[in-house]
Image (cartoon, rainbow, N blue to C red):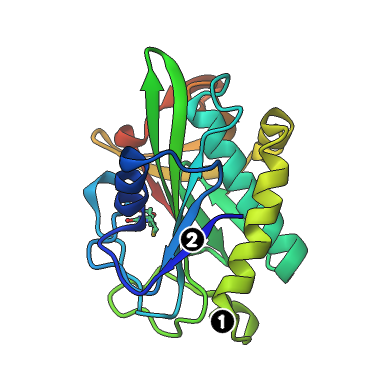
Amino acid sequence: MNIVKLHATTSTNDELKSRFRESELPHLTTIYTMEQTRGKGQQGAIWISEKGKNLTFSILITKNIQHLTPFLVNQTVSVTIVEWLKRELQVQAKIKWPNDILSVQHKLAGILIENFFSGTKLTHAVVGIGLNVNQETFESLPRAISLKNITGREFDLESLLISFLSLLKNNLRDPLRVAQEYNRYLFRYNQMTSFKSSKGSFEGVVKGTDPDGKLLLQINDVLSSYELKELEWMY
Ligand code: BTN
């Protein structure tokens, strides 16, 4: 596996994209860093992570991606994180659609995938993952949690990364099978849940996702699909 360790960079997603623009890189090339000076979160947010304590990394996916949709890539990555946490670390986690991994209702990891197309076909994806590992306190992030907080143990970052990448490599051989497991790990699946939208608060039962990656909610016996921009989880 082609793993590059950096002392610091702006964002591992940006670093990987710029290296890939300059030269071909093998499938699953991974960059991880001890510090990001401009770590990116979803929807223009900043990803904050204490220096040297957590895994902040990006993986290049180039193989067998042409037949996948961006949401299938997202599902495969999300399911892999949760399966890996369970199998390797005995940590129970859920996927809070569409990009968060929660454990004990707190955010353990965040995913930021950047997709690249030729026409309508995906050519490659840069999968960025921030996983809270050894950080103990999260000032001004009351909903964050780390593996150390959950297990009481300290982890070696590189060993964790290698073990995660090996499961991802395997799961990417059959992403459709992996993606089928998505609902099983979906936060609040089949449960009545509160959301907020521009029209106010409402409740619905989480019924899964549609092929475009919209969230399916059943409200008064009617099934409707929602985009991320349209709602906020209340939990
Ligand atoms: C989110 O929950 O908002 C997504 C966070 C994604 C953070 C990771 S850290 C490694 C990679 N590089 C970035 O700049 N962002 C992602």
Vertical side of 74 occupied by 159: above or below: below
Asked where in the image residue 158 lies, by quadrant, the reply is: bottom right
Between residue 235 and residue 187, name the one nearer to us.
187
Seen in the image, is 151 located left or right of residue 132? right
Q: Is mark 1 within 8 Å of ligand 1?
A: no
Residue drawn at the location 56% of the way across and 27% of the way down: 65
Give the number of the disc on residue 109. 2
Residue drawn at the location 25% of the way across and 33% of the way down: 199
Q: Residues within 10 Å of mark 2 (few under 14, many from 20)?
A: many
Q: Can residue 94 be seen in this snapshot?
A: yes
Residue 172 on image: x %, y %: 66, 38
Q: Quadrant of the C terminus?
A: bottom left
Residue drawn at the location 46% of the way across and 41% of the way down: 98
Between residue 110 and residue 227, name the one nearer to us.
110
| Residue type of the residue flagged with mark 1 | Lys
CB under 8 Å between discs 1 and 2? no
Between residue 211 and residue 36, name the one nearer to us.
36
Asked where in the image residue 120 lies, by quadrant, the reply is: top left
| Residue type of the residue flagged with mark 2 | Ala
The residue positioned farthest toward the front in the image shown: 23
Seen in the image, is 223 located left or right of residue 93? left
Residue 29 on image: x %, y %: 51, 50
Q: Is mark 2 within 8 Å of ligand 1?
A: yes
